[in-house]
Amino acid sequence: TSVLFRLPQSCVALLKGAESSANQNGETMEPPLKRCRPKLLDSVKSPPRKLNATDTEMEVFKLPEGRPLSAGRFVTHIRYELATHTVKVRRTGVLSDVVKLWDLQGTSAVTESAACHLEGDISRFQRMPSIDSFNAKSHPNEMLTGLRYFERAIKGDNGGPAKPGFDWGQVDTNALAKCLLTLCRELKDTLCLEPRLVKLKSPVYILGDIHGNYRDLVCFEKALWRMGPLLTPASFLFLGDYVDRGEYGIEVISYLFAQKMLAQNKFYLLRGNHELRSVQEMFSFKNECVQKFGESVGLQVWEAVNECFDAMPIAATVDDKIFCVHGGIPCSDLNIENINKIPVPLKDPELESPLAWEIMWSDPVSMDLMTPENIKDLKEHNGFIYNTRRGTAYFFSCEALMAFLDKNGLSHVIRAHEVQENGFQVQQQGRLMTVFSSSHYCGGSNEAACVLADNYKLRMIRIDTT
């Protein structure tokens, strides 16, 4: 109503004018939709559009692109239902008590009439995913319990051995490997069922390269999803490069795989260029598996993890406006819907899918590469030139990015793949963002960051990892 009172004419005149216009066009007048926040600008170049004589005042109520039509209307086919569990949360954000609703029968928390309803619904509740999500004996929760022990320092009181933080101490590594192998078998089937182009709705936290930095991953958890993804009102999207270079690749993928299994519709893992066997053999992850588990078991773990990598999605969109990938936009095919045609599993992307390979490896062209020769090549090849730094895939220009965005009705691209001193960088006329989520990368001084896509804003969040 406050919008109506601020209009330059009365509410009655506004509605009569709109009704008259609709009748002239043979249209049926519908009540105006709820006013929503404007969408992000489609182009930083274009000046604000001026209203002309043909524009109607009803545009005040027009929903921005990407906003579901249900945002301003009641939708009758959507039904809420009771969650299976109630949880107690400590002031630190840690869950301390998880109880099934039907276990509360006979207490003041559940009335007799509600108890009768629960008794009739127990079989349905037991089939719900949250049963596994809160089951402490499930493989994902067992893995997370083990990782909590790994993270925690133990003083060694009462005659027990001391253990530094981020150390397995006297844990049987064969038991850890067995749990991880089981987790990989379960996760691979889940990932194979996901589309190659995942479509998400905001709010979404978007994280870049982790590279075996489990300490920083714990910092992100404590800052963003301390109660766990399932109880956090946002989704989480990781852009790849989980292993290599850092010393805790096993722990990073164990954590991410476990959380993915517990919150399959809120935790999403894309594939990066280090989720490749050939790359891991050149860097550290294969050796890490062998060093932590021994030759035989280590190679089994390495292969099982890579079978999950083979099944990971390649790209994602947020609200059909934000395109999220590890590397960059593709040169061979600009239509993002064709990403769903990429085969799964994808063991050798370089041979099996040029589209996936380019998405995983490409970079934006930097100013130091804008030589007269490269500028000429960029113009001749629609904004793409060979990526000499990677030795594969392409560099893409701002013009190529704009063409890609326009073709697919997108507003921005968010990618990872390159370390940034501040944890992020805004590039190419504000339409491209690079995010990096591993601080002090390879001994450097860079920060770790993530992007929050929410309420038609892209917010860069730097995490204190000290």
Image (tube, rainbow, N blue to C red):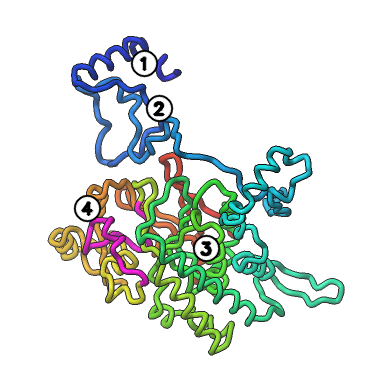
Q: Give the SS element for disc 3.
A: loop
What's the amino acid at mark 3? Ser
Which disc is residue 35 wearing? Answer: 2
Q: Give the SS element for disc 1.
A: loop
Q: Is residue 65 left or right of residue 190?
A: left
335 in magenta: yes
Residue occupied by mark 3: 439
The numbered mark, 4 or 1, whose residue comes first in the sequence reads: 1
Q: Are marks 1 and 3 in contact (CB under 8 Å)?
A: no
Where residue 183 sits: x, y (%)? 55, 71
Residue occupied by mark 1: 7
Mark 4 or 2: the one toward you: 2
**Distance of mark 3 from mark 2, alpha carbons?**
41 Å
**Distance of mark 4 from mark 1, alpha carbons?**
40 Å
What's the amino acid at mark 2? Arg
Which residue is drawn at the image coordinates 30% and 66% (left, top)? 342
| Quadrant position of residue 19 | top left
Q: Residues within 10 Å of mark 3 (few under 14, many from 20)?
A: many
**Distance of mark 1 from mark 3, alpha carbons?**
50 Å
Q: Give the SS element for disc 2.
A: loop
Q: Residues within 10 Å of mark 1 (few under 14, many from 20)?
A: few
What residue range appears in magenta? 323-345
- The chief SS type of the magenta part is loop
